[in-house]
Structures are given as structure tokens and as C-alpha cells.
Amino acid sequence: MNSTDKKPVSSEELKKKRDKFLIPGIKHLYSNPPHFVKGKGQFLYDEKGKEYLDMFAGIVTVSVGHCHPKVTEATINQLKTLQHTSTIFMTQPMVDLAEKLAEITPGNLSKSYITNSGTEANEGAIVMARVASGRHEVIALEHSYHGQSHLATTLTGNHNYRQPVTPAAGIFFAANAYCYRCPFKKTPSNCNLECAQDIERVIQTQTSGKPAVMIAEPIQGVGGTITPPDEYFGQVKKILDKYGVLFIADEVQTGFGRTGKHMFGISNWGVEPDFITMAKGLGNGLPIGAYITTENIAQAGQKAVINTFGGNPVSSATGLAVIETIQEEKLMENAKVIGDYFVEGLKDLAKTFPIMADIRGKGLMLGVEIAASEKTPMPDETARIVEIAKDNGVVLGKGGVYGNVIRIKPALNINKENVDACLKVMRKALETVVPVGVK
Ligand SMILES: Cc1ncc(COP(=O)(O)O)c(C=O)c1O
């Protein structure tokens, strides 16, 4: 009997074993987690064969659906041919993927470094920005998430994901563009993009005046789908250019068509960054990450970088197949159409449930902030909605600094029927948590 022939254990048994052998920091989304054993398209299956509509796609990662035939075939073919050499040997899949990334990214981005994760992509981009600029300081945004290494957790403006250890040096935070909870108490009618201007204040008052780089997610993912106004990144870029600061768009969640109109989220704001970092959706579940930068910046980094698994043939061949699938199946266009349909349905639901206080996002990167009157966050209710939805066969995500944002980020090939099924279950969960008529 090989390992794949093993009968899966029950979720109860697995939970006990988990508690014995995994560190407690590995937390699951649910207090009563199912044991998933199979995925197909937009569906997951537990060990008893129960089907779940997956609206979170393995944390915004399964971009073309679970076990997509074309992608799986590319992975298996490569696995059978050549699995590994490391970056010190020349192989074609890594180079082909880098060529494709240069083709689909905006502006003059053309030189890639392929890694195993988003964290590593961000680490690499920050180091390269520091080397190329000869400067050290970095600006990040409050409510951000950039990964789990020492540097990446320091770049993360969310206490939930920062360990109580001495942070990395030289990182400074500006306010984020959180319109629903504007840090400057503004409303759209009197907004002067104070959040963008805050970057200049941080440069002037917290740094040497010459930071190396700023890193930002076009839409903050883990932070709760926080979506800046249309003029935000244009204004930010002007300030960065004034001080000679490079810009990294962390597209680990927003990349590869997820936001609907563009391959990369930052293009929604008409801005060309100096780096794009990516991961998650590029591999559809296989470990991969990358940064891409300009020829000019890349030339500053002549010192050797080795990455044992980075750009390995299997992940690279898979990444290439994922991008081709997104293009061939017009999944970016689908994300726009289905995302708009989803937003309409959510807004309709919010008429009955005012605790759905803010509905935001672009394409299939959506968030619903759950709050009582006075915008009081409702994290317990949010957790219950997500748990009840799971019990009724729908997987939703959860996030936000206050733990009160439902995150909807499914595979890009879901359809209207899936949306209707999700909304029906959300209605049921909301009715259970907040009986109709109660505010
Ligand atoms: C925006 C963003 N950047 C970076 C990361 C880190 O990526 P990884 O978990 O692949 O290291 C994440 C992960 O959630 C992310 O959402």
C-alpha cells in the first residue's frame, strides 16, 4: 500500500494527532475543522465525501480551480522528466516563466528572481531595492501583510501576525487608505487623500529623508480587502518620486487577473511600480514566488544569489501553465463579470443584514466588513458566520486586524450558480447569527 492508498482518518482523530505533533501556532480557520482530502474545480471534499464550495481557494491561491487538468498535467510531466537541479544549473522552465512574467507585467519590468513563497519574494525585493538605491529605510502601510520571515513580519502592520521579538531595523509605517475607518476621520466628500500625504510626513519625520523603498499591497488582503480610492497610488507615486524612493507592489494576492480588469492589481491605479512581488495564484497550490524588476535595478545586483528550490522545474512549469490557463480561459474577464455579480448580490443581502457594514474589493477579491452600529467590529459573529457557512458546505475566508472581515477570494473560474449558492448559505448563516430585524 502506498501513502495515497491510505484510508483517511476521521477529522476528530486527525485533530487529536495535530494537537500532539504540530506547534500550536499553526491555527486552523475553524474551531471544528473538516479534514479535506480532495479538491476539484471550485469544490473541496472531506473524508466523508461531503462537498464544500470553496470561496477562499486555499487563501487566494488556487487561481484556476483545484487540480485543473492542464496545470496538473504540466506538473506531472515535469515531475517525471526533471524535478530538481537548483539555481546553479541552467534549466528551461525557470527561464520560460521569467520570459512570460516580463510579457504580462506592466511597464519596464523584465528581470525576475523566482522563489518558493511570497515571503521570500518580498525579502528578495527589499534587499535588491536596498542594494540598487544604496539606501536602507523602508516604508510600509498599517494593516498590511507581507509574510512570515523576520523582515516580512516587521513589514506587516498587523499585531496578529507579529511575534513579540525585536523587529528588523529601518521599517516605518504610514496610515493606510482605509476609507470605511478613515484614519483621518474623513469621508469621501471631504477626502484630500490625507492617507497618501501621510507618506510624506513619515519620510520627513521618521526617516533620514532618503528611504530606499516603499512596499504596499494594491488591495490589502489579510488586512481585510482594504481597497484604496482611485487616485491613491498615483498620489503616493508622486511623493515617492519626489524623494527618489522605489516602489514595490506586493501582488501576492492581487496578481494574475484576480482584480478583474488587469493582470496585476496596481494597474487599476495606472501606476508602474519598480518591483512586483508575486506568489500564491501563480502556482495554483505549488510552492512558488517571484519578484520582477527593471533592467536598471537588476544590474545593481551582481553578487551571487543561490536558491536551492527557487525556480525549480516543477514549480516553474506549473506557473507557466497557470498563466496560460488564465489567458486561454479568459479568467481575468470572468473575475470581473462574476465579481460584479457577486457585489450586487452582497449589497442586496446587506439590505436585510445591516451588519454587512462595508462591501469592497475588485473582481474576485472581495470583503465584507461585519460591524454593529458606530462601526463596532463584530469578530465573534464573523467567526460564527464563517463556521456556520462551512457546516452548510461553503468555505469563506476571514481577516482584518479586528478579525471582522469575511474574505471572498475563490478560483477565478467560478460561475453565477456558485455565487447564488454562496449567497444562499451566507443568508442562512447571517439569519442564525443575527435574527432578521435585529440591528
Ligand atoms: C500580500 C501578501 N504578501 C506576502 C505574503 C506571504 O506569502 P507566503 O505565505 O507565500 O510566504 C502573503 C501571504 O498571505 C500575502 O497575502
Image: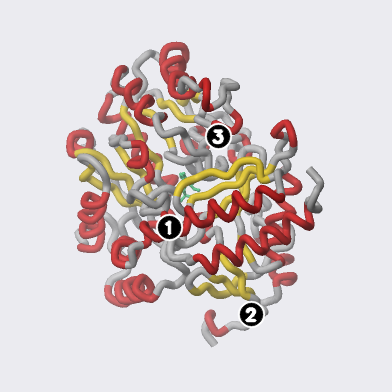
Q: Could you tell me which secondary element the residue under label 1 belongs to?
A: helix
Percent x, y of residue 21:
66, 61
Mark 1 lies on residue: 337
Residue located 73% across and 42% down the image? 378
Residues at discs 3 and 1 in contact (Cβ within 8 Å): no
Percent x, y of residue 222:
55, 44
Residue 374 vs 330, above or below: the answer is above
Q: How many marks?
A: 3
User: What is the distance, in whole Å, between disc 2 and disc 3 at their CAs?
Assistant: 38 Å
Residue located 73% across and 31% down the image? 374
Residue 395 vs 209, above or below: the answer is below
User: What is the distance, in whole Å, between disc 2 and disc 1 at their CAs?
Assistant: 31 Å
Q: Colour mode?
A: secondary structure
Viewer-closest of 436 and 146: 436
Amino acid type indicated by mark 1: Val
| Left or right: 330, with 55 as reference point | left
Q: Could you tell me which secondary element the residue under label 2 belongs to?
A: loop
Mark 2 lies on residue: 49
Amino acid type indicated by mark 3: His
Q: Earlier in the sequence, mark 2 or mark 3?
A: 2
- Residue density around tag 1, few if under 14, some if 14–19, many if 20 or more, within 10 Å: some
Percent x, y of residue 418:
54, 67
Q: Earlier in the sequence, mark 2 or mark 1?
A: 2
User: What is the distance, in whole Å, between disc 3 and disc 1 at their CAs?
Assistant: 28 Å
Mark 3 lies on residue: 143
Q: Quadrant of the C terminus?
A: top right
